[in-house]
Amino acid sequence: MLLAIDNGNTNVKFALVDAQGAIVRGWRIATDLRRTPDEYAVWLDQLLRMEGFARSDVSAVMIATVVPRALYNLQVLASKYFGVEALIAGRAPVEWGIALKVDEPRALGADRAVNAIAAQALEAGDKIVISFGTATTFDHIGADGAYLGGSIAPGVNLSLDALYNAAAMLPRIGIEPPASGSVIGRDTVGQMQIGIYWGYVGLIEGLLARMKAEIGRPVKVIATGGLAALFQQHSHLFDRVEPDLTLRGIAQLYHSNFPSA
C-alpha cells in the first residue's frame, strides 16, 4: 500500500491507500519541526498496529509538503522504517500531469497542485477549490484540469490569533458559529464570534462571487481542509465538501505516475 503524507503548516496528515486508490485509514499529528523520524515511527507504528496493519504493508511513500524544513525527517522516516525512498510531489520522477498556468509554477504549493488533481477527478467543467488551513486558499481549476491561479487569505485561526495577540483586553476564543442568528452581539465573546465567523462567511461569499464573475462560466465549488466543516451548514457556499481532498490528490498523483504499482 501507499503511505500518502500531506505535510501542512498546522498538521501532518498520513493515509494508507490501497491499490485502487482508496484511502483505507488516515491519521494526523501536529506539525513540529523538532519531531524526529524515530518519533514519527513510534507514533505511526502504534496506530498501524491498532488498525490491524504493519509497517511491512507499506510499499511506497509519497509526500506533498509546504514545510520544506520538515521534509528531511519524513524522508528519513520512509527510508529507515519503511525501507523505501520517499517520492516528493512535484519533484522528479513525479510529474504533475496537469498544466500549471501561473507566472511562477515552481512557487505553487504542492497541496494546491494535488488538490487540483483530485478536484478534476471529482467534477467536470471549471472548479474552485477552497482549502481551509493555516491560510485559506481559493484556486481555479479549468475544465481540462489545468491550475489557472487563485488567491490567499489569512486562515480563520490565524485571524483569531492576530486579534488576541494585538488587543490586550480581548480573550482567546475558539471559532464556532454564533449561538444566535443575530450579527449584533451583547458581550465581548459573542461580538468576537460574530466578527470572525460571519466576517469569514462574507469573505468567502465575496471572493467566490468575484471569481465566478471573472471566470464567466458555470463553476463547481469544492471545500476542503480541517475547518471546512465549520461553514458546511451554509450549503449555498459549496457544491461539495471533501475533507481528504489533498490526500486523495496525492494518491491519484502516485497512481498516474506509477500505474503498475
Image (spheres, rainbow, N blue to C red):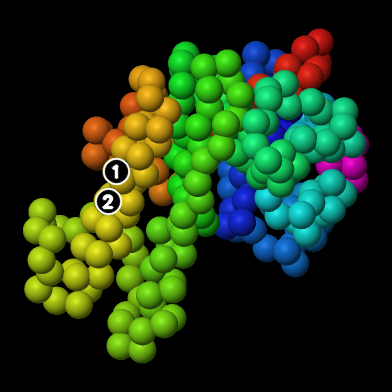
Residue 147 seen in render: yes
**Which element carries disc 1, helix, strand or loop?**
helix
Residue 183, image x and y in percent? 13, 61
Q: Which residue carries the number 2 mark?
A: 202
Tell me the number on the disc at residue 205. 1
Residue 54, image x and y in percent? 75, 34
Residue in the image at 38% along x and 25% along y:
216
Quadrant of res 87:
top right
Residue in the image at 60% along x and 30% along y:
147
Tell me the number on the disc at residue 133. none
Towards the viewer: 259 or 199: 199
Residue in the image at 46% along x and 59% along y:
154
Quadrant of res 97:
top right
170 on left or right of 24: left
Query: Which residues fall within the magenta stretch?
Result: 78-84
Looking at the rendered structure, the kind of residue marked 1 is: Glu
Question: Compared with residue 178, is residue 172 higher up or lower down, i.e. above or below?
Answer: below
Residue 40, image x and y in percent? 74, 53
Quadrant holding the N terminus? top right
Q: Residue reaching furthest bottom?
A: 168
Residue 112, image x and y in percent? 60, 39
Question: Compared with residue 42, is residue 172 higher up or lower down, i.e. above or below?
Answer: below
Residue 230 seen in render: no
Towards the viewer: 115 or 76: 115
Residue 81 on the magenta span: yes
Count up the numbered dots: 2
Quadrant holding the C terminus? top right
Residue 110 on the magenta span: no
Looking at the rendered structure, the kind of residue marked 2 is: Gly
**Which element carries disc 2, helix, strand or loop?**
helix
Towards the viewer: 180 or 60: 180
Disc 2 and disc 1 in contact, CB within 8 angstroms: yes
